[in-house]
Image (tube, rainbow, N blue to C red):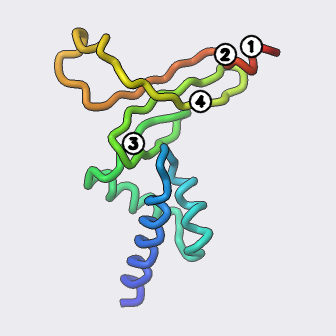
Amino acid sequence: MGRQNRATKQKEAIKFELDKIDSFFNAEELFERVKQKEKSIGMATIYRFLREAKEKGELFTYLCNRKTIYSKGKKSHCHFECEKSGKIIHFTIDNIDFLKDKIPGTITSFQLEVKGICKDCCKK
């Protein structure tokens, strides 16, 4: 019975921190936030929670820099990766209508990765 209470307390701590996040995040970032208040939480608990939330359709996943990132909304994920510094800059695209004629169906979300040289590295 004690384990069930602890799991509920840990889930509540995860949900509390998750409610404060309004952008993309990874499992490690969520873990660090929750760990500050719930010292006994383990990384496996975070991964289990994230997997279950994804299965329920409460979270969505994308790949960024070869890592899984999560989103609470069915947002599309776009980022620019600098080939010199490795810096990743997230950005949004409001409209991809130019793809409508090329896709044999309805677009519900998308992920876009653009590579190049960032402004800071161009100045060097």
Relative to residue 81, is residue 37 depicted above or below?
Answer: below
Residue at the bottom extreme, as displayed: 1
Question: On the image, numbered disc 3 is attached to which residue?
Answer: 61
Q: Are marks 3 and 4 in contact (CB under 8 Å)?
A: no
Q: Where the N terminus falls, by quadrant?
A: bottom left
| Disc 4: which residue | 89
Q: Residue furthest right?
A: 124
Mark 2 or mark 1, which is nearer the start of the sequence? Answer: 2
Q: Position of residue 105 (x, y in %)?
A: 17, 21
Pick the quarter of the image with the C terminus: top right
Q: Residues within 10 Å of mark 3 (few under 14, many from 20)?
A: many
Q: Position of residue 113 (x, y in %)?
A: 49, 23
State yes or no: discs 4 and 2 in contact (Cβ < 8 Å): no
Identify which residue is drawn at 49% across, 58% down: 20
Pick whichever of labels 3 and 4 is earlier in the sequence. 3
Q: Are marks 1 and 2 in contact (CB under 8 Å)?
A: yes
Q: Mark 3 falls on what kind of element?
A: strand
The amino acid sitting under disc 4 is Ile
- Find numbered disc 4 in the image and state the secondary structure of the residue it sits on: strand
Q: Which residue is mark 1?
A: 122
Ranked by sequence position, the earlier of labels 3 and 1 is 3
Q: Which mark is residue 117?
A: 2
In percent of width and height, residue 8 lies at: 38, 77
Q: Are marks 1 and 4 in contact (CB under 8 Å)?
A: no
> Alpha-carbon distance for marks 2 and 3?
26 Å
Which callout, 3 or 1, points to the residue nearer the camera? 1
- The residue drawn where x is 25% and y is 25% is 107
Residue plotted at (41% across, 77% down) = 7
Residue type at numbered disc 2: Ile
- Element marked by disc 2: loop
Distance from Cα at disc 1 to Cα at disc 2:
6 Å
